[in-house]
Image (spheres, rainbow, N blue to C red):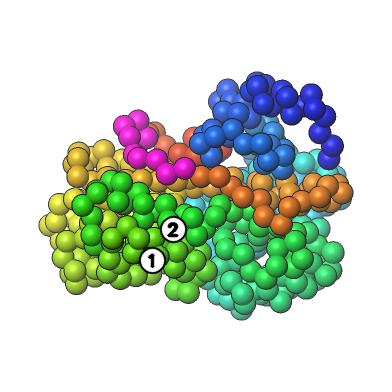
Amino acid sequence: MKRSSRFLTAVAVGLALAPVCGRAETVNDLSLKQFGKVVTNPTILDALQHAVKPLTPEIRKKALECYRSNDCNTGTGGKLTVAYADGFGENVWRKVTKMEFILQALSYPQIGHIEYRDARGDVSKAISDMNSYIAQGVNVIVIYPDAGAAMLPVVQEATAAGIKVVLHNGPAIGTAGKDYLTNVREDICQLGNALVDSIKQGNPEAKRIVELGGTPGNTLSSTWQACAAKQAKKDGLTILGKYDTNWTQEGTFKAVSAALAQFGKIDGWAYEYADGFRGAVRAYEAAHKPLDMVAALRTDEQGLFCDWKKANNPNFKIYYSSAFNISTRIALTAAMESLDGKSIPAWIQLPFKMKPVKQGLCNPDLPMETSVTTTLDDQMLKAMFPK
């Protein structure tokens, strides 16, 4: 895919494109919303250009069909088959990210078939899903490799078969650019540093913090936690413990309840999943403890912000980054560009910025699981998560 200098100049000055899902946005608007800055990476810009295309009723209907069936024809007559291999698709963040992938795929007329598999945290199934895609001869696989290094042999096999494999949102496995096309993610180690720094920013007197992670042994949690431990030492903080939550509210409730029972007062919490942290709020309430703490989080589902608003406690502080549901869009665009012969870097780094929670981030008309940075609109979200 070639870009003219005229196109890049137009993007740089905020050329108004078609509205996103009924909202009047530009590529620049979407960039600022996602990353806190106007990006210049050409692959990310290309992905954003696709993301701001308007959704017709026909595309909405097809997207929901693909979302519900996990295997669908796009109806375009395109020759390409693209697949999403999700290591653990059992929470709202994963489902929204899946829909972002589907909508991006539907923006390419050359894509005729979309497939999705959810390994549900089972390593053997994750490998089996990849083997199935290889046997089918799909053209592209976007993968969230929750199982980490265990996935490397089958990823290498897919690449050797000529499939464009792109990782997203998790730490690297193997050698990017060789074992697979590229990895679309923020700097996970820097994320860990930023989570700790945010706790210290929210409470300069903080001393005792706890790290929460997702499924046991997942590489995302272990990577940022290792870096956060080093940063905590620099910031004069003690990490009291680490707890798995399975990325669910109930899992978080149990983990936080256990930590509160063991350690009493805790100054701060570092965690990937804002919606899951709603379980922590319930744990404090169940323990009859005030929400006097700082939560530093990777994602930005609005339900927690509604809880924060309801609590009305100035000592309850939240810092968040971005859900990066859009990462599957960027991953797919990278693969499509590579199929077009474009050179793709081994790491497409997503910029991020930690932000303090503020008023206006709770919209009761939308599902509580909604990320404030998703490109999905209220109509789509309500269809995906009916009350």
Left or right, 259 with reference to 180: left
Residue 192, disc: 2
Instruction: Give, as a single range, the part of the protein colored magenta.
Output: 353-361
**Could you tell me the amino acid type at mark 1?**
Ala
Image quadrant for the N terminus? Answer: top right
Q: Quadrant of residue 155?
A: bottom right
Q: Quadrant of residue 110?
A: top right
| Magenta region includes residue 266 | no
- Residue at position x 79%, y 55% from top? 81
Give the number of marks. 2
- Residue at position x 71%, y 43% from top? 43
Q: Main secondary structure of the magenta part?
A: loop
| Magenta region includes residue 360 | yes
Kindly indicate whether the residue at mark 1 contacts the one at mark 2 (C-beta within 8 angstroms).
Answer: yes
Sequence-wise, which precedes: disc 2 or disc 1? 2
Q: Position of residue 354 (x, y in %)?
A: 42, 44
Q: CA distance from mark 2 to mark 1?
A: 8 Å
Q: Looking at the picture, does residue 336 appear above or below residue 269?
A: above
Indicate the secondary structure of the residue bearing disc 1. Answer: helix
Residue 311, disc: none
Q: Quadrant of residue 28?
A: top right
Left or right, 217 with reference to 24: left
**Could you tell me the amino acid type at mark 2?**
Gly
Q: Looking at the picture, does residue 328 appear above or below residue 137?
A: above
Q: Which residue is mark 1?
A: 229
Q: Position of residue 282 (x, y in %)?
A: 24, 56
Label 2 CA crowd tier, 10 Å (few <14, some 14–19, many 20+): many
Is any part of residue 54 visible from this angle? no
205 and 125: which one is in front?
205
